Image: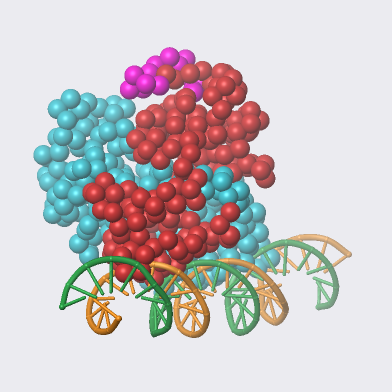
Chain colours: A red, B cyan, C green, D orange
Amino acid sequence: MFGKIPKPVARRLAIYYRVLKEHNKNGAETVSSSYLGRILDLKPSQIRKDLSYFGGFGKRGTGYNVIDLMKSIEKILGIDRHWNVLIIGAGRIGRALANYPGLVQDGFTVKGIVDVSEKKIGKTIDEQLTIENVEEMEKIIRERKIDIGVLCVPSEVAQKVLNSVVQYGVKSIVNFVPKRLKTPKDVMIEDVQISLSFKALSFRMVNSQR
Amino acid sequence: MFGKIPKPVARRLAIYYRVLKEHNKNGAETVSSSYLGRILDLKPSQIRKDLSYFGGFGKRGTGYNVIDLMKSIEKILGIDRHWNVLIIGAGRIGRALANYPGLVQDGFTVKGIVDVSEKKIGKTIDEQLTIENVEEMEKIIRERKIDIGVLCVPSEVAQKVLNSVVQYGVKSIVNFVPKRLKTPKDVMIEDVQISLSFKALSFRMVNSQR
DNA sequence: TTCTTATTGTGAAATTTACCACAATGAGGT
DNA sequence: ACCTCATTGTGGTAAATTTCACAATAAGAA
């Protein structure tokens, strides 16, 4: 689509996006690479290079138009559209995600949350979402056109649950289970490991690196 | 301590650690780089190179002793000791973290959780932790020897809260607020942005890269 | 002991990523 | 029209990271 974009570049685009959003909220119309660099502690040249991967649309002397840049990044990251999300597992993490404002804002709509526990099924979260029976999952995935499954189940059952989700046609998974899961080649999975950030921090603490 | 360890290496060590832990639980005494590589989808040579940064302790022909390797990684990452954690903000994310098993397992002990809301103060989480008044924070940090502050407060007040936490002597922060915060040079901060994983996934979905 | 097999540790090459330096250029002022 | 200032876009280079390739060696079998 845009030629080959290096992985670190894609990662950074998402970070630029957040800053742009804030900058836009503050009413700014343009940003310069040096401004972004200062905020994000990156070299301006890197930012310019990153943005040049998908065609220069900055204006020399002026910088980048914030809104144009945001729109372009949205397109590249695929968040210029809506993705339907199903959360599997209504434990603490699942429930925390269920109405996490950051997701909806970026085009990820939580279309449902399921669990096995009789006690949880039927309860509502913030009067918006009702926890449904995991046995309804196949139907939910089909009828609500779920694009992304979010795994928040106990470790022991994770692989089994993942297999079902995939079998019902979901090809994209965000995995909060601290365990490497096996997926068919055509299924994409992103692991989220919150404890990695804590470990990164303690590594820095004992090695006193910045 | 171990000479200069490249950043990507430190990141991967934490990932190896998780796999080792699981492998150890399954009763294995040794692992080979090719096994780890297969599980983690990395080249065995990379794993060997990574491990060689802090002195070879594998055995040719046999592999690595799982427990020795875990212990070494614990030391490098600084999780061979205990860190005291204070969670600031008892919203959904703060509460989800409060008893997240992954943290305690890796040496991060949640010593408290504070909030401003009258409604929340005094409530307990899983009969273990009681939400305390944010005004007690200074005392809590001092008395419980808090090493790490975890920011889970609304965006608008994040910078202000961070400033207090730092002022009270905490030098390490894990930030769940989706906003870049300013810190003095001697304070370390790790940003956690859950929505980045969702964006990485959607990027892959629209670019169909693996 | 000697052979075979498995696997590490590592110098060097290959690849990827970051950074620099500067020409190009748009905007605003004079 | 011309000058000045700010800032982009990018070719080339430097630095970082990954991968290769293979000698070294431990363990077990013959």
Name the residue nearer the viewer: B187 or A58: A58
Looking at the rendering, the stretch of residues picked out in magenta corresponds to A114-129
Is A69 above or below relative to A164? below
Q: A210 or C17, which is in the foreground?
A: C17
Residue at left 50%, top 51%? Answer: A76
Q: Is residue A28 left or right of residue B205?
A: left
Q: Is residue A192 left or right of residue C6?
A: left
Quadrant housing residue A121: top left
Tell me the residue at 24%/49% (across/down): A27
Near-viewer residue (A205 or A2):
A2
Q: Position of residue A209 (x, y in %)?
A: 33, 67
* Relative image position of residue B161 (x, y in whole percent): 17, 46
Instruction: Name which residue lies at 33% across and 22% down.
Output: A126
Which secondary structure dominates the residues rendered in magenta? loop
Relative to A18, is B12 above or below? Answer: below
Does the magenta-highlighted stretch encompass residue A86?
no
The spot of residue A156 in percent (x, y) is 55, 33
The reply, left or right, for residue B13 in relation to residue B23 is left
Q: Position of residue A30 (x, y in %)?
A: 30, 57
Q: Is residue A121 magenta?
A: yes
Is residue A58 visible in the rendered image? The answer is: yes
Q: Is residue B25 visible from the viewing direction of this image?
A: no
